[in-house]
Amino acid sequence: MSELKTAEQHNAPFVGKSDLHEHTVDFNNYLRRCVFVLIAVLCAVSLMLVASYLPSERFDWPAKVAMILAIACTNAFVVAGFLMHLISEKKMIYTLLAFTAFFFVGLIGLTVWAMQDFPAGTVTH
């Protein structure tokens, strides 16, 4: 008898109005969003390819890498924001993303800072 009561109590939140059914999903709207994200990703990849083939006389290698990284970051934001629904997430997700970005930039900064720091006794050229 107690098993039946716990089963009924376990399913009790789903009786009546549920929080899961508050947001209606419009498939056409979601499909349209996915198509726009696909077009944005294809445009970003095309821009990265164009940036990699820019003439070397006007754009040196670090400038090309900076452009490609900026395009890739924008591409990652579009994919993570719209396909993974991170734009509509709560404050905790944004806090974790901010910490991740902070530490990633710190690691890149440490790498660039130590780029010319060779161990003693090694030959650089």
Image: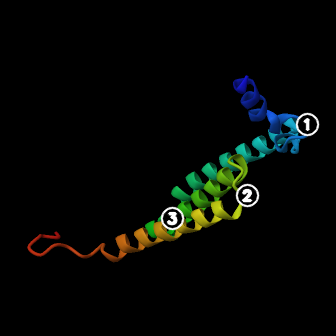
Residue type (three-letter) at the residue carrying disc 3: Lys
- Rendered image: mark on residue 64: 3
Q: CB of mark 3 within 8 Å of CB of mark 2?
A: no
Q: Indicate which disc, 3 or 2, sits on the residue closer to the N terminus.
A: 3
In this rendered view, identify the residue nearer to me: 45 or 117: 117
Q: Residue at x 76, y 29 (%)?
A: 5
Q: Secondary structure at mark 2?
A: loop
Q: CB of mark 1 within 8 Å of CB of mark 2?
A: no
Per the model, the C-alpha gap separating discs 3 and 1 is 58 Å
Q: Indicate which disc, 1 or 2, sits on the residue closer to the N terminus.
A: 1
Q: Residue at x 24, y 76 (%)?
A: 117
Residue type (three-letter) at the residue carrying disc 1: Gly
Give percent across and percent down for residue 58.
52, 70
Pair 3/2: label in front = 2
Q: Residue at x 91, y 37 (%)?
A: 16
Badge 3 crowding class, 10 Å Cα cut-off, few under 14, some 14 to 19, many 20 or more, is: some
Residue found farthest to the left:
121
Instruction: Decide if residue 112 is on the left or right side of residue 7.
Output: left
- Rendered image: mark on residue 87: 2
Q: Is residue 92 above or below residue 41?
A: below
The number of numbered badges drawn on the structure is: 3
